[in-house]
Image (tube, coloured by chain):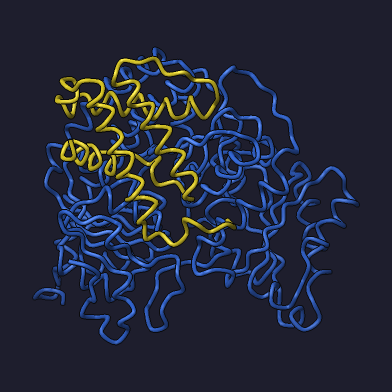
Chain colours: A yellow, B blue
Amino acid sequence: MTRKADELVAYIQERCLWQFASRAFDREENIDGVLTLMGIILSGGSPVLKTPMDRLHFANANHLASEVKSAFPWLKELHKEDLLSVISGVIARIHVLTVKQSMNAELHQQAY
Amino acid sequence: MPMKLLDCDTLIPEREQHVYIKEAGEDTTQFLPVSNAATIPGSLSERGCAFCGAKLVIGGVLKDTIQMIHGPFGCAYDTWHTKRYPSDNDNFQLKYAWSTNVKEKNVVFGAEKLLKKAILEAFDAMPTIKRMFLYTTCTTALIGDDPKAVAKVVMTERPDVDIFVVECPGFAGVSQSKGHHVLNMGWIHEKVGQVEPVITSEHTINFIGDYNIQGDSEVLQRYWHKLGIQVIAHFTGNATYDECRGMHRAQLNVVNCARSAGYIANELKKQYGIPRLDIDSWGFSYMATGLRKIGDFFGIQDKVEALIEEETAKWKPKLDWYKERLRGKKMAIWTGGPRLWHWTRAVEDDLGVRVVAMASKFGHQEDFEKVIARGRAGTVYIDDGNELEFFEVIDMVKPDVIFTGPRVGELVKKLHIPYVNGHAYHNGPYMGFEGFVNLARDMYNAVNSPLWALAGHNIQGGVQP
């Protein structure tokens, strides 16, 4: 599972701008919002979109889900629990790369 | 390989923290160049000043606004006409330069009276124009002039005019980037929310961080029109002053240049709850991706797919023609910041071109996180590169073409290396589907031009050194 998560992380790092927002809180919101919705989409669920931010995350998640489905055929073979476990690993790793261990000194500046 | 001290930098070893060569398996938690930091004394920087970042990049683009520069005339002249951003009202903003033309006597006795006189003179000379950006410069900031007070007096005397003051002298920051920041924050705090736009569509956006360079905004506007999306404000390509005062009414902020205008998108989210969608509007595949996301946001996927199909049918064969001929070429990108990460994968995916070196003048660490994540292993990544570093990196990576600005472009031309203007373009627009074909065409023409070889030929005999 870790290897599968790493493959997805490498793909997301190369392709997605939402993980690199200016401030830590925006990055966290985007990572959790987009990847959680992507998990729902990939596992056949119906996302509930109540707010403009939900629709934003859906826009990013829907496109990413479609891309990773063709880039990583093994996704279709995973059971729902395994799929969500992989996504959970991806979320944790992207948090580490772009927030927790990021060397970007501006991430936590309070003043713009 | 971690951070790299180039041979030319042995006397300024601090530069090691600004140069990185990526190796396979490395990520940005291990190495990230220092950036948005003061230029190290002794390093021949290619940066511009903070005032330039506000005026030349963002404010000066507005098509119905006098750009009054309170300072010596050189500040106005040097930020006029060096970037080609046209407009659909006969290019008002490109025709004129306005300055208070401050002299030594004004430095001694103050220049506020001179400023008021210049403002009134400009409005009188252009009676149909009622909007003004007013900039301080190093000189007038140092003597302590108060342009906001002067603007207030003028707006009281003439209620039909509106003036936005940008207090960002050249020395205010380490690079152009500070000017972007000051203008963004001033605008959101002082002007956004003052005008209520007329809403004509159920889908509305602000398109942020596009400056209509050689018609970029016009290309994108055609897409928005076909999709039935109303753009409340382009920030600031082909835009009016008052359109940008109504930005608070958009449903979505679509951001291209996150460096020059990410601040206002963040603030619009914070203050008005408008979500921010970052896209790349350079790049054939990227453009389709961006449009699909907008389609998903508004639920207009069918319209988006029809547009992509139409544009692909029209432009993809041309793009592929260039791709066949450019595949494997090596490219260097030495621009401001965001174009590094906008272009590095786009040229690789769409044109088969490898980016082997990138230098940013004013990018922040956020920009380096993006570009290192997207860029290749083996590629050189430089913050605030200096001239000697450029020479050394050229020897190291031997690029076939370099996309950079006119300043560094002159240096590159003397080395007889093909150069394309990466700031104001050679023959744009470069955004959108057709734009990337234009970029490919300019790259192809540059790489295959016979002039570079001829330039090295000495007609008096022998080869030019």
User: x%, y% of residue A106?
Assistant: 47, 59
Q: Residue at x 55, y 65 (%)?
A: B50
User: x%, y% of residue A72?
Assistant: 17, 29
Q: Does B6 sit above or below residue B146?
A: below
Q: Can residue B55 be seen in this snapshot? A: no
Q: Residue at x 46, y 55 (%)?
A: A107
Q: Does B109 sit above or below residue B246?
A: below
Q: Residue at x 20, y 26 (%)?
A: B317
Query: Which of the two residues, B171 or B314, is positioned nearer the viewer here?
Result: B171
Q: Residue at x 62, y 68 (%)?
A: B169
In the rendered image, the quadrant that contains the C terminus of chain B is bottom left
Query: Which of the two residues, B266 or B363, is positioned nearer the viewer here?
Result: B266
Q: Is residue B206 left or right of residue B409?
A: right
Q: Can residue A95 be seen in this snapshot? A: yes
Q: Quadrant of residue B202?
A: top right
In the rendered image, the quadrant that contains the N terminus of chain B is bottom left
User: x%, y% of residue B95?
Assistant: 59, 50
Q: Does B175 sit above or below residue A56?
A: below
User: x%, y% of residue B262?
Assistant: 51, 47
Residue positioned most to the bottom: B11
Query: Which of the two residues, A105 or B262, is positioned nearer the viewer here?
Result: A105
